[in-house]
Image: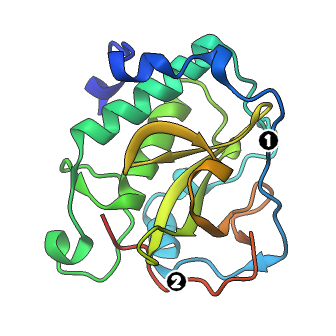
Amino acid sequence: MAGLLGALALPVAAQAQTFASLPASPSTLPSGSAARPIAAWVTFCERYTAECAVDRTEPATITLNPATWNTILAVNHRVNRSVRAVTDMDHLHLADRWDLAEDGSGDCEDFQLLKRKLLAEAGLPRRAMRMTVVIDEKGEGHAVLTLITDRGDFILDNKTNTVHGWRQTGYTFIKRESQDVQAWVSLGRVTSPVTTANR
């Protein structure tokens, strides 16, 4: 994992996503009442306590600047390129397991958890980076990472190297980790998927 942080040079394809091109009007996801967490997240938090802890002394918002934006783009691209996408069933013979892709393979949530770990190591506040459950373009459960910033909520996704504002993803947003406690909050009225175990 240390190699992933080294030389965070921005790939040519991502260079088109400049800081200057960010929307002028921030758009944030409205969060609602408490929601039931994904069962595999609960197990992940038992194994990786620090990855799930909520430090309320951390900023709840990432202040974006060109350097921070370039770090976000580089980590998103690097993890997407370096981790092999495979379902938990094919990889581990389990329906759903959240992990940090330590062996270089994983499904959607493993990509996002690794990105969050690397971005936190680069100095971004973990509290402003929340695991999020959506319904994707196939109508399946999928996990993305929401970055809560002063320029709006942006989504890191293993299906694309482009970092989109949440409204541009085409996904239906269901729930995400709370910023205040180790729990989840609802983002809409749609029924939650039981798992997020797709590539």
Q: Residue 164 placed where, x, y %?
A: 57, 41
Residue at the (24%, 69%) spot, across then down: 87
**Residue 152 shown left or right of residue 168 in the figure:** right
Residue at the (66%, 82%) spot, across then down: 36
Q: Quadrant of the N terminus?
A: top left
**Which image quadrant is residue 61 in?**
top right
Residue 11 appearing in the image: no
Which residue is more in the foreground, 114 or 155? 155
Amino acid type at mark 2 = Pro
Residue at the (63%, 12%) spot, across then down: 66
Above or below, 64 against 91 in this view is above
Which residue is more in the foreground, 82 or 139? 139
User: What number is the disc on residue 191?
Assistant: none
Above or below, 123 against 94 in this view is above
Above or below, 175 against 170 in this view is below
What residue did someone put label 2 on?
Answer: 193
Which residue is more in the foreground, 107 or 122? 107
Q: Residue 123 placed where, x, y %?
A: 59, 24
Residue at the (56%, 68%) spot, across then down: 134
**Which image quadrant is residue 110 in?**
bottom left
Q: Circle 1 — which element?
A: loop
Amino acid type at mark 1 = Ala
**Residue 143 shown left or right of residue 19 in the figure:** left
The answer to which of marks 2 and 1 sits earlier in the sequence is 1
Q: Circle 2 — which element?
A: loop
Q: Residue 124 placed where, x, y %?
A: 62, 29
Q: How many marks?
A: 2
What residue did someone put label 1 on?
Answer: 60
